[in-house]
Amino acid sequence: MTGYRAIADYYDAEYESLEMLQHDVPLFLQQLPRRSLKILDLATGTGRSAIPLAQAGHRVVGVDYDPTMLALARRKRDSVALDDRSLRLVRSNILRLKLSQHFDWACIFFNTFLNFTTAAQQHQLLQTIKQHLQPRGRIWIDIFNPNPEVLAQPVLENLDLNLFYVDHLDRSVCRTIEVRQLPQPQLQRVIHHYDWFDPQRGRQHQQVSFDLTYIYPRELELLLQHHGFKVEIMWGDYKASPVTRTSPRIICQARLKP
Ligand SMILES: C[S@@+](CC[C@H](N)C(=O)[O-])C[C@H]1O[C@@H](n2cnc3c(N)ncnc32)[C@H](O)[C@@H]1O
């Protein structure tokens, strides 16, 4: 299975009403000191997080391997009059990133850390992040906390029904999510189903599949420690509550040890 590729044309419309995405970037912004920082936004997508970070006065580099997502990010960046110095957009696989720059912070939002499904990929990602951080630089990781009720079901269908309208295609799309537990440990296949009606061709269906791992709070802490980070914060939601067994999120801030 290859990595996650969104349907770029849908991405902003698909996620604009998702409640958690109203809170994730503001919480991160609150954590940052007032001075201007150099921030590496990993898997930046359409710039959902990179643009507000740059607008807050930080110098941001956003990296993604999907040229269509990056083209949308570039268009949105230009439309709010941010220049390339405030927000640079780079096309690269983040596992093979090689920038000649060091950052105060690296961030990876919206579960994307879980797209790196093997220990080898997690290792490579954390090594790459370390190579791009200043001494004592920080990382911000925001992932879901595994929900035992979901994991107990081999297959779950018709989750998270979302009806959204894509303006530039003049199309209403109905999306549902299917989650299948795979035989390998801590691995699940996520399938996004998209249905819409085309006046010429009738009912249309498209699906996007990708694999996601899931990790537990203590496991994340050990992983980060193993790679030379000290966990400074671990929250379970966007109200900055401590993470518990039933928290929806694992929001983690960690710092490179000297
Ligand atoms: C769920 S979207 C998140 C986008 C954005 N960070 C946000 O929060 O809205 C995941 C993004 O990760 C990108 N991506 C996944 N694996 C990647 C990789 N190995 N290297 C670069 N980008 C990757 C995809 O192209 C997609 O844009």
Image (spheres, rainbow, N blue to C red):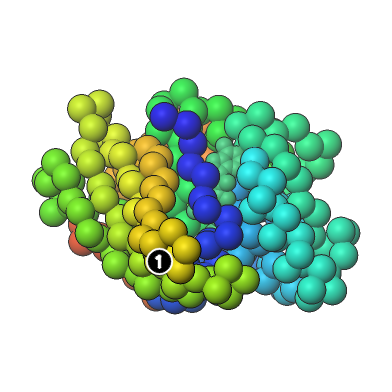
Q: Hey, what amino acid is under mark 1? A: Phe
**Residue indicated by mark 1:** 197
* Left or right: 212 in relation to 146: right
Q: Does the beta carbon at disc 1 come under 8 Å from ligand 1?
A: no
User: Residue at horizontal 30%, vertical 60%?
Assistant: 176
- Give the answer, above or below, for where 221 lies relative to 7: above
Badge 1 crowding class, 10 Å Cα cut-off, few under 14, some 14 to 19, many 20 or more, is some
| Percent position of residue 14, x then y | 47, 67
* Left or right: 43 in relation to 224: right
* Left or right: 142 in relation to 108: left
Given residues 168 and 121, the one toward you in this image is: 168
| Percent position of residue 230, x then y | 50, 44
Q: How many marks?
A: 1
- Give the answer, above or below, for where 120 lies relative to 132: above
User: Residue at horizontal 21%, vertical 38%?
Assistant: 181
- Which type of secondary structure does the marked residue at label 1 adopt? strand
Q: Quadrant of the image for the N terminus? A: top left
User: Residue at horizontal 36%, vertical 61%?
Assistant: 203
Q: Quadrant of the image for the C terminus? A: top right
User: Residue at horizontal 48%, vertical 42%?
Assistant: 4
- Give the answer, above or below, for where 85 lies relative to 191: below
| Percent position of residue 99, x then y | 78, 37
Given residues 199 and 64, the one toward you in this image is: 199
Q: Is residue 11 visible?
A: yes
